[in-house]
Image: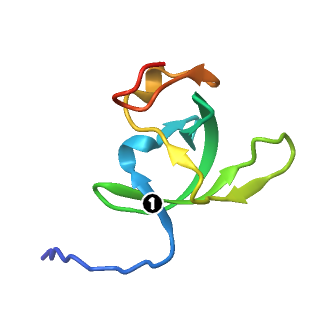
Amino acid sequence: MYATASLMVTHKDVWSVPIQAVFEQNNQSFCFLYKDGKAWRRQVLVGIRDAEHMEIKQLRSAVAGSGWVDVGPADVFLVGNLGSLTDGQAVAPAGEER
């Protein structure tokens, strides 16, 4: 006999992004952040996820050897065809020209 259940979980005070903002490579999770008109590839530690969103616990520091840093309100995650992006590539928000 089998049963299916759904549980509603409340997880407060976390940063979450659409699941399309995160991709995996070699069993590690990555994203692209938007800063100063460019896409910057960063490794992320992910947490709870559902069908639409994924918790981002921390980002790998952009400074080599600095470890992990917390996500903040200034971090802008890119969503879209992330496979076509490269680290440092010039990008523009939708509706704006590069």
Q: Quadrant of the N terminus?
A: bottom left
Q: Is 74 above or below relative to 36?
A: below
Q: Is 77 above or below relative to 84?
A: below
Location of residue 8 in the rendering, given as x and y in whole percent from the top left corner: 27, 80
Location of residue 98 in the rendering, given as x and y in whole percent from the top left corner: 48, 19
Query: Outermost residue toward the front?
Result: 96
Provide the residue designation for mark 1. Answer: 16
Q: Secondary structure at mark 1?
A: strand
Judge the density around disc 1: few (<14), some (14-19), many (≥20) Cα neighbours within 10 Å: some
Which amino acid type is shown beneath numbered disc 1? Answer: Ser
Q: Is 3 above or below relative to 55?
A: below
Which residue appears at 21% of the width and 76% of the height?
6
Which residue appears at 30% of the width and 54% of the height?
52
Which residue appears at 61% of the width and 34% of the height?
41
> In front: 73, or 26?
73
> In front: 59, or 7?
59
The reply, left or right, for residue 36 in relation to residue 18 is right
Query: Outermost residue toward the right?
Result: 65
> In front: 66, or 1?
66
Q: How is the image coloured?
A: rainbow
The reply, left or right, for residue 32 in relation to residue 54 is right
Location of residue 92 in the rendering, given as x and y in whole percent from the top left corner: 47, 27
Q: How many marks?
A: 1
The reply, left or right, for residue 9 in relation to residue 55 is left
